[in-house]
Image (tube, helix red, strand yellow):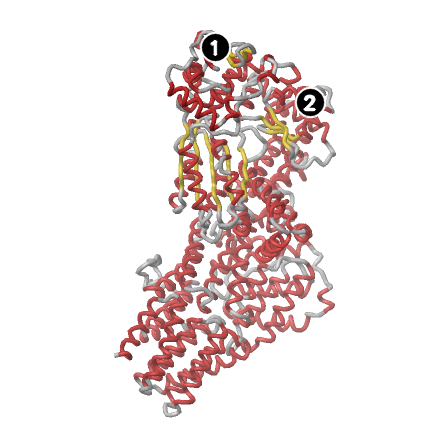
Amino acid sequence: ESASDSESGVDAYKTIEEVGKDLHLLLLDPDRFLFDREARSTDKMQLLYRKEKLYGRDKEENLITDTFCRVTRGRNEAFFIGGFSGSGKSMLVDTLRVNVKNVGGYVIKHKFDPISQDTPLLGVISALNQLCLMIKKRLSPRRLAELSEKLKDDFGADIGLLARMLPNVCALSPEFSSLAGRVEDGNTSVKMSFRSVSFTLLRFVRLVSSAKRPIMLVLDDLQWADDTALDVVHTFLSDTMGSCMFFVGTYRDNEVQVGHAVIALMENLKISNVPTNQVSLTGLDQENLNEMVSDALCLYPRICKSLSDIVFQKTKGNPFFVLEFMQSLQSRGLLQYDSFQKRWVWNEDAIRAEEITGNVLHLLSSKMNQLSNNMQLLLKVMACFGTSTKESVIGYLEESSEYSEVRNGLEGAISDGFVAVYAEGYIKFVHDKVREAAYNLIPDGDKKQLHYDLGKTLYSICEGKDVGNTIFLIASQINHGKEFIEKDDALRIPVAKLNMKAGKMALDGCDHKMAYSYFLASESLLPDDSWESCYDLSLLVHLLMARAANSSCRYDEAELTLYKICKRARCLQDKLPAYFLLVTIFLAQGNPVDAYTTCSSILAQLGETVPDVVTVEMVGCIIPETLSMYSRVYSDDWLEKNMKDPKLCNIVKFYSVIGIAAYFCKPTHSPAYFVCKMVQMSLRNGICQQTPLALMQLSLIAFNNTSGIPFNNAMFVRCIAKNAFLLSDKIKSDKTMLCDTYYSGAGHLESYQSGAKQLRKGFASHLSSGDTNAAFYCATRAIHFSLISAEKDLTSSLKEIDYYLRLLKTYKSELAMEFILFYRETVSTLIDRGERYGIETNSRQEPEPGSRLLEVFYFHAVLRNFWLGYTERCHYFAKKSFAFSKQASAFTFHFYYGLNLIDMCKTKASSLKTKEVDQIIASMRVAASHAETNFRNKLELLEAEHYGLTAYRESAVTLRAYDTAIASARKAGFVHEQGLACEKAGFYAKRLKDNDRSLTYFNQALECYKKWGSSVKVGFIEKELGKLNV
């Protein structure tokens, strides 16, 4: 037919092989070569592009599919696709959508835009926000309810923080809407940063993703992303605690050079051991391009090869360029449908003679220049707004006289294939090159003016209306024409207020970088005498700008702005928010000395006397005085009394911060002084936001600062802690810090294992809200509780510790890192003496006297040497650590110390050591009466060992005591201490020459130590079993 349809006969078959190939193609894909020619008139015939088909990318398609398959096994991976604009990057990504959906996963996507009002970080957040709606649509009611419970359990009160970033999370549960409404601004917004935002988002990703439901995050045009957005991506992918994400990033490799954020992300992912793949798409080769042209013309490849060769020379095989070039040939009559031949025909000589640039923009611009004025106006306006525009914005512009005809060009722009309308209410350019060409319709000298005019028009129409996020668009358009605003004094203040409003909305959405840019624009528009002519506005703008600078990690700019406020503000009351933020920055930057000095100065200006040195004697007096005052004053009447004087509230606020600073830079007794001052002020003057925490801290002080042992006043301490929680409920304050403090004091009365879980929640909550000091304090306590209770096996504990250490390096929190490194050495030592996992610490060097690390150093030295069987070393470090023995946490230390004393007495009798053991057993008996789960098994093992030492002939009693200790440890879930009790019982039975019983006990110990994950103890017990078997 081809031969007969062609007048010249050049398409005639020359060999039977050609006939066979064409018939084979026809059988494989009849739709490609057969279509209803009779139903189409020549002038309306369109090229039949297969827009869903990906040409010439089989290798890359297989690679990206294989990568995703690995992700479905529960791991994170990254896949980067480079290439020129129009090379098919997005189509390659789209080939995977069906596979992701088939396995139950989610595909979320964002396209970065160099001209949009959105920042790159907001784009990532927006993609996750859309994920919430996908989850609601995809999950069954039962699974949705289960997920909602997981979110509520993990986030707790922080669900409000999450809802600030992802408003659609409220769609997952009606309960979340009410929780979101309880978010308090105040300290949270002061402390939050992009790191806390990324961690909060990571918590969400961990809960909603899994190997069965992986998330595919696609970020298009990474060349326009910044390090903030890509740092969030790195946070997701480097996570080792449960997330499952496949990240795909596309970028124009000709626009990404060394030093770009994309290159930095690739390098950081490799450093973090995240599997990373990279491909680069070049133009199609001639064979694949010929297939593409063949599809468009519905002709066999052999027939259109001569045309495709010319197209290849003109376009270098760029797929998008090919499409536009072919359409331009059709529009100019160089490619036509011949109704007589019923096929497409072309003039090869004329096409070959075409002079076109190697840039598709030339073709698009030429085409757009022929459009009607209304269509050009629409395209210009949309190009000023970015790759997409809300239909509502077009509606606002229609209300103005200047842009009343703007919508009239929409239908033509859609039919000509420049834009498309999407269901979510957006009009989008079909390709970013189309937007570039549309933007180029505006002369360079007129672009700022057009942006400015659009912004002014929208501002005048929308003023006083609730337009939501459109305020960002309005402000950014006006800001393009800053020089025009500066010439119009009447507009400066209104536009400054507009930028301030946009900045506050960005802060509410946790995009601190964007907020800072709006506040900076607002500040630049204020008149030179703003501190006199518009004082209130100037004060507010500068304070908000400092907050946003701090949250976006621009600490130098934040400090400079705060110092400016402190210098220019009219009174101390106006300066206090700036000083408080300044102190917060000092603490976050690891500078407690400046924080303490500043607080001391402010408190003095507020009329308080802060001693130069807080002595032990001062603390010794103020603690009983405060406890006595609490007993007298606390009542129902006091609970109704609020602290109304702002000055007094500020005094308590600064006392709370100076106490934190004192914890890091002053002697260990100092913080108690400031806690007592807070409590006394509250008892005298009424309740404020800091009062519940002050009471909880008082309970901690009371627990650890009594004559005798902490558990002697357990009931009183419990009462204070309970009242702190009740008061928090009454005034609706955040309970996170209350729980953290509780588990440092009265929480020792609860299960250590449940305490570890609660402290991890506290860590996550504090890191989400930006309070890194509190977060890593919780992390340290969680590790401690987990270690002493064997809440996790040692390998899992080491994994958790290394996770915290990675975060500490990111946050540059050196002091907390030193604390946690002690735990890493201990855990690594208990696993295999550090042979496999190594030891990264200088903890063998004793810290300086007075250092907060000294208590931790001695505790770990005792713990390690006890489990390794180094009796004399254990005794040496225990004797040096008695200065800390009254702390509640020291009861675990006393347990090991007591067992070690008994071991020493087994080899050499000592009445003095025996008396010490009696004292330890007596104190442990008190502890067990108040906290049975934590201390009952310890008491029973000490008693069993003591019986074995002093009542050797009463073996039946002693063996029953060991069995009781083993049962109590099993009940408490302390598998390591269950193994220890079995081990001690085995040695006792061995001394009795009862080898069968000894074998039983040692085998039980072996199973416990295997479960705990200590190769050191497993090896030790295996040796003992070997001796018995021999």
The answer to whether residue 101 shows anywhere in this view is yes
Displayed quadrant of residue 859: bottom left
How far apart are the alpha carbons under marks 2 and 1?
46 Å
**For numbered disc 1, what is the local secondary structure?**
loop
The answer to whether residue 583 shows anywhere in this view is no
Marker count (numbered): 2
Q: Quadrant of the C terminus?
A: bottom left
Circle 1 packing at 10 Å, graded few (<14), some (14-19), many (20+), is some
Query: Toward the viewer: 105 or 866?
Result: 105
Q: Is residue 1012 left or right of residue 97?
A: left
Query: Toward the viewer: 968 or 875?
Result: 968
Q: Position of residue 756 (x, y in %)?
A: 51, 64
Circle 2 packing at 10 Å, graded few (<14), some (14-19), many (20+), is some
Please say if 353 is above or below 592: above
Please say if 865 is above or below 112: below
Q: Position of residue 361 (x, y in %)?
A: 51, 18
Q: Where is residue 314 in the image (x, y as percent from the top left)?
A: 43, 15
Please say if 637 is above or below 536: below
Residue type highlighted by circle 2: Arg
Displayed quadrant of residue 63: top left
Mark in front: 2 vs 1:
1
Residue type highlighted by circle 1: Ser
Q: Is residue 633 left or right of residue 796?
A: right
Residues marked 2 and 1 touching at CB (< 8 Å) = no
What residue is pinned by disc 2?
Answer: 407
Displayed quadrant of residue 548: top right
Q: Position of residue 946 (x, y in %)?
A: 40, 85
Instruction: Point out which mark residue 867 bears.
Output: none
Instruction: Point out which mark residue 6 bears.
Output: 1
Q: Farthest residue to the bottom: give it.
A: 953
Name the residue: 40% across, 41% down.
Answer: 276
